[in-house]
Each structure stands twice: as structure tokens, then as C-alpha cells.
Image (spheres, helix red, strand yellow):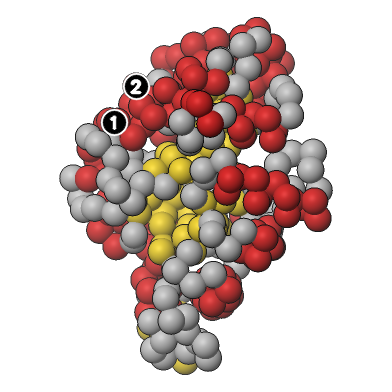
Amino acid sequence: MPAPPSSQAGIMIPFDGVPISEHGPVVRYLAELGYDEVWTGEGGAFDAVVPLAAAAAWAPQLRIAAGVLPVYTRGPAVLALTAATLAELAPGRVTFGIGASSPVIVEAWNAAAFARPLGRVRDTLRFLRAALAGGRVDERYETFEIRGFRLQRPPAVPPQLVVGALRPRMLALAAEEADGAIVTWLPVDQAARVADEFHSHGSGRLIASLAVCPSTDVDEVRRRARAVVTAYLTVPAYAAFQRWLGRGPQLDAMWAAWERGDRRGALAAIPDAVVDDMIISGPAEQCRRRIDEYVAAGFTDTVINLIPLIGDPLEAARLVAPVPAAGR
């Protein structure tokens, strides 16, 4: 399936090893390299909003995107305020992603209850739609109730709302009610399956978030990436996603070792082939071809997440930039 005219090439910031205060020249350089959109996630390093606000001022030609904000760690009204503020700061240039996150981030780190993730994401999405339209929201949703909320400054151009989605029910929600979905830790040989699942329920942006490390030192990439891949694929939602994709037999030994508390054994048990599927590495042109394969499989957009394994992230961003090879 060819890429639509609106296809966006994104990249995650902040870059590892570069203080946020020094990202102004970085973000402007990314725009020069042909990136359309800068994304931020939210884990244990920084929040997703402050870098985007700064990026909107540093490079007004770029779109900004949060991918994704957990629906449990901010109240619905605070999420609406955040989305509206970003939309006023960068009119027509904001993608606002929400998702369920994980029990570790929600419960262990933020003292909230991780319950009914599909329902909570659905209800938050519906609330945000209503709130960002500027109306008063008095609604009892299935997972929470809102009484008398109205944005005092609803944005003239609401942000695009996308959902962090992996399996069929969340992909269906994203296609039917959001402006799109963002999918992570997806091997390219399964990209068409996920794209078909999404497009069978509707249309919109389908965004692949891709871990990329342009290096020809295969052994070193595998050695360093093994811990990154294992840490993510042992998260319950990602484990379930891999099982749905048919990767269970390849990963059962790793999951079993992890459950026993044998972290070293888990790292040893994950096959090289899985690491190679999850981390796009190799020469720059090979990396670029693999990134483009997701668009050929039915994804509309790609987001490069430079895994801080080897080399300078600015050089890595240049090597895999979405401009013709002659320009790199």
C-alpha cells in the first residue's frame, strides 16, 4: 500500500546524553534533515510535555507529538488542559497520544490503580473529544465520572488524538474513535497484519514507533540491545502482543527466566533473531529501507526512536533521515 500524501516522518526526543537545555540546535537540525514531527514518550527520564513545548518554540515548522501519555497518571481534566495548551501553543501541529501504559508505571511509580485499561483509554478518549470541542462535560463514563468541566480556552484547532495500540480491541478503538494509532515493538514481518487489523475498522494515521541503531557492529548492537528488548517484552501488554503475533515459542524461555527472577538467564534466552527483528540496525541505507518497509506494509507514518547504544545520536539521526541519500 503506498504512503498517503500526508505521511509524516518523526523522531523521538530528547536525545540521550544531550541536556534538554541544549536541544534547541538539535531540534532545528532535525527539521533541516527532513523530519516532519518530533515525539516524546514518558517513562522514568522526563515528562512528555515540557520538551514538546520547547520544541514548538525552537522549530515552529515541525509538528509536535506526545506518544504516549498514560491515562491513569493524570486526571482526565488535566489531560484535557495539557492537550489544549499544546494546541494553542502550536496550532494545527499537535498530535496527542494516550495509552494504558503499564502496571509498573501506573501502580508502582504513581500509586494509581491499573484497572480496565481498554475501558479507561476509551473513556478518556471520549472525554477529550468532548472537552476539546469546548462544551461542558457532565458525564458518567464506565470507568470514571466528570461533573461540570469546561475548558476556559478550548483550542481553535484541536490536536489529533491517537491511541497507543497493540492488539485487536485497542486497534479497533483507535481506528473507530481516534485519529489514529501508534504501535511499538512490532517486527516488520508482522506489520501488514497489524495494518490490516487497523484498517479493517476505519482509517486515520497508523504510526510505527521503531527502535533504530545505525551501526554495522552487529555483535555489539545485539549485546547492548538485549537488555532493552528484554525489559520491554516482559511488560505484560507487550508480552501479550508478542504472543498474539505468534512469537510465544521464541520468547517462552526468556519469560520463564524473568518470572524466576533470573535476569541474566532471561537475557541469554532471548534469541538473536528476536533482537534483530526489534532493533533496526546495520548500514544507514539498510536501516532506511527497513523503516520504509512499514509504510509499504500499510502504515502511514514512522517515528524513529534512536536507541542509545553506539555512537553520536545526532550523526545517527542524520544517517537515517528521511531525505534523499545524496542529501545525507
Q: Position of residue 309 (x, y in %)?
A: 70, 25
How many residues crowd mark 1 within 10 Å: few (<14), some (14–19), many (20+)?
A: many
Marks 2 and 1, the one that precedes in the sequence:
2
Q: Position of residue 215 (x, y in %)?
A: 63, 17
Q: Is residue 196 above or below residue 215?
A: below
What residue is at 45 percent from the left and 14 percent from the top?
A: 250
Viewer-proximal residue, 85 or 172? 85
Residue 255: mark? none
Q: Residue furthest top?
A: 219
What residue is at 81 percent from the left and 55 percent from the top?
A: 21
Q: Is residue 38 above or below residue 94?
A: above
Q: How many marks?
A: 2
Q: State which mark lies toward you, 2 or 1.
A: 1
Looking at the image, residue 173 sits to the left or right of residue 148; the answer is: left
Residue 297: mark? 1
Q: Secondary structure at mark 1?
A: loop
Q: Which residue is mark 2?
A: 189
What residue is at 49 percent from the left and 26 percent from the top?
A: 325
